Image (cartoon, rainbow, N blue to C red):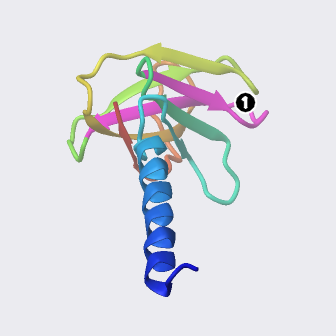
Amino acid sequence: MRTPYRRLTTVLGIAAASASALALGTAPAHAAGSVYSAYNSITSPSAKTEFAADGEILSALDMKSDGHGVAAQWRYNSSSATHSYYHGGGYATVGKWNLSFAEGTTLQIRACLQDTSSGTPYSCGGWEYAKA
């Protein structure tokens, strides 16, 4: 017959082993395959920007058939220098750009509308954080 103490230590041992196995098998929150998204509007988005950490690919998706092009913008964390890429391919098309950052670099992305390659981005959404 087992004593209550022995039962308790067995249960605690099993729980500790299970927790260790779970902790070892859990990936970090922002692993290399993370994809970050930003929209130009919360209620009715017409432009989407994504940054894929794996390969450091920035993309712009035109989400509405409205005659406007889209722009994907990025900047280093809170920097005043903004980099903008225009995509005028039309509704449901994606423009992609291969960027290069040091591993772990923090940046911000946002989505905007833009009417021509020489135009100025407008109707931009808020800045969203991303990590290379």
x then y, percent, for residue 56: 41, 21
Is residue 67 inside the magenta stretch? Answer: yes
Q: Quadrant where the N terminus lies? A: bottom right
Q: Quadrant where the C terminus lies? A: top left
Q: Give left or right: position of 50 versus 42.
A: left
Q: Nearer the viewer, residue 80 or 104?
A: 104
Q: Which residues are magenta?
A: 57-76
Q: Nearer the viewer, residue 29 or 27?
A: 27
Disc 1 residue type (three-letter): Gly
x then y, percent, for residue 87: 57, 20
- Residue beneath the point at 26% across and 33% down: 104
Q: Nearer the viewer, residue 1 or 11?
A: 1
Q: Nearer the viewer, residue 4 or 122?
A: 4
Pointer 1: residues within 10 angstroms few (<14), some, or many (20+)? few
- Residue beneath the point at 48% across and 35% down: 34
Secondary structure, mark 1, is loop
Q: Is residue 56 above or below residue 42?
A: above
Query: Most extreme residue toward the bottom, as rendered?
Result: 4
Q: Which residue is mark 1?
A: 67
- Residue beneath the point at 60% across and 53% down: 41
x then y, percent, for residue 92: 75, 26
Q: Give left or right: position of 88 versus 119.
A: right
